[in-house]
Image: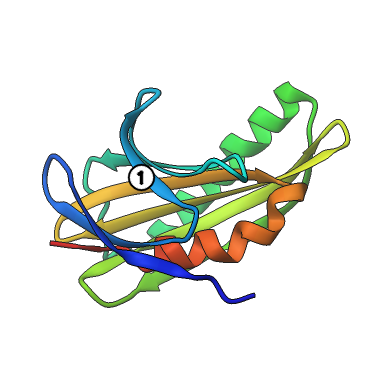
Amino acid sequence: MMMQMEASTTIPLKNQKLIIDLPQGWSHQQNYWGIPLAFINTSKNITVAVSELVQINPSFTEIERQNYFTDYKLGRLAWLSQASGKLVKFYELEVMQKKQAVSGLVFGYVYKLDQTTFHEKSYYLTCKNVSYNLKYLIDQSQMESMDTIDAMIRGIGCL
């Protein structure tokens, strides 16, 4: 399914401006329920949370990336144990290099709580020395939006 894009949107933040092509039906809001920036699709009940981080080293060595991913996995497994959830799989660690000076790491996992399957993805992106965490959580009924969400996030740039 081809996603329709609306006009490019520039969002001023504390340290720089983000540029994003929001798909049709998506909007952005700053200071949304304590989240500094959110991309929202109200009709599908999906929110992508954006937080600025202390800068992540975009030139992690392979060992450092794997250690970061291992820490992530251990944290998620501990949470699943407390929540009586079941791991389905981890999305593999991906290193992102793209235009407009954006680089970073992408990973996530799929898990079950009761009878519901959830997909969580985290993007740790650095753009011109400012780092961000973009995170979303969808359930199985929202899976049709996953490619759109990932393309939207991968299209982010900065000024």
* Observer-nearest of 58 and 126: 126
Above or below residue 82? Residue 150 is: below
Residue matched to label 1 = 28
Q: Position of residue 62 (x, y in %)?
A: 41, 67
Q: Position of residue 83 (x, y in %)?
A: 73, 24
Indicate the amino acid at tag 1.
His
Tag count:
1
Q: Position of residue 38 (x, y in %)?
A: 39, 40
Residue at image location 21% in from the left, 60% down from the top: 127
Quadrant containing the C terminus is bottom left
Give left or right: position of 132 versus 153: left
Above or below residue 6? Residue 74 is: above
* Observer-nearest of 60 and 22: 22
Which quadrant of the structure image shows residue 85? top right
Asked which colour scheme the image uses, the reply is: rainbow
Q: Is residue 71 visible?
A: no
Q: Is residue 150 visible?
A: yes
